[in-house]
Image: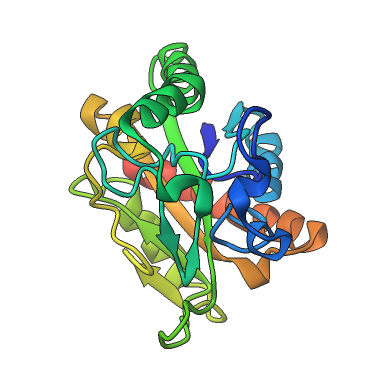
Amino acid sequence: MICLCDHATNTVPAGLPARLGLPQEDMARHIAYDIGAEGVTRALADAFNGPALMSRFSRLVIDPNRGEDDPTLLMRLYDGSIIPANRTACQLERERRLDAYHRPYHNAAAALVAQRETPVIVSIHSFTPQLAGRPPRPWHVGVLYAHDERLAAPLLLRLRAESDLCVGDNEPYTGRLPGDTMERHALTHGHLHVLIELRNDLISTETQQQAWAARLAPIITTAVADAET
């Protein structure tokens, strides 16, 4: 089992404007990283006794879960906040960030996957309970996938058997995102994979992160066994 976390941190590397010109409170929001996802990813990797790969730069620097030609690769406006350092970023700056951050992340992911004969890839993300001006999101956890449902389908079944969970099927986002991490490293190679979204108010503390990882690990393991039979 390989665990990935595309949006692990809100770090803005040296050489870029501090906080990309944003106030600190914006860098602490979901727009800059997936709150709690890193802790869940680390704990899951420990439970699986497997590797984890996590980004070391904010998704606002450049989003590793987007294809290189995706218009949202460098976000200029996100959930009501304008990102000053991205607003006027030119093609040259976009290419510089691809070379410095986006491509090394994907090179590392590809190398990690290549080390295993039959890799199973689990990507961990988190989502905000409510976007500005939108209805509250009821889901505790979402399972995202594209056309390969081999792991997603049994995982959805297992999660829905948990009576206290509201489970999203391709919610709050669709897993059909051309050029994203899962398409690039799993879908196009036929590897078992799934992307799991957790509502970030449920994993904001280390205790919550550990508890969710402990809960998810056996469910994922059983779903993998279901998928492989």
Judging depth in this view, the residue of 4 and 132 nearest the camera is 132
User: How many marks are shown on the rendered structure?
Assistant: 0
Quadrant where the C terminus is found in the figure: top left
Judging depth in this view, the residue of 180 and 196 nearest the camera is 180
Q: How is the image coloured?
A: rainbow
Residue 118 appears in which quarter of the rendering?
Answer: top left
**Left or right: 51 in relation to 176:** right
* Residue furthest out toward the front: 88
Taking the spot 39% from the left edge, 59% from the top edge, the residue there is 143
Taking the spot 60% from the left edge, 31% from the top edge, the residue there is 52
**In this rendering, is residue 69 above or below 204?**
above
Taking the spot 43% from the left edge, 19% from the top edge, the residue there is 99
* Residue furthest out toward the right: 207
Q: Position of residue 165 (x, y in %)?
A: 53, 77
Q: Position of residue 135 (x, y in %)?
A: 42, 88
Can residue 81 be seen in this snapshot?
Answer: yes
* Residue furthest out toward the left: 147
Can residue 119 be seen in this snapshot?
Answer: no
Q: Position of residue 177 (x, y in %)?
A: 25, 48
Judging depth in this view, the residue of 153 and 22 nearest the camera is 22
Residue 58 appears in which quarter of the rendering?
Answer: top right
Q: Position of residue 122 (x, y in %)?
A: 47, 41
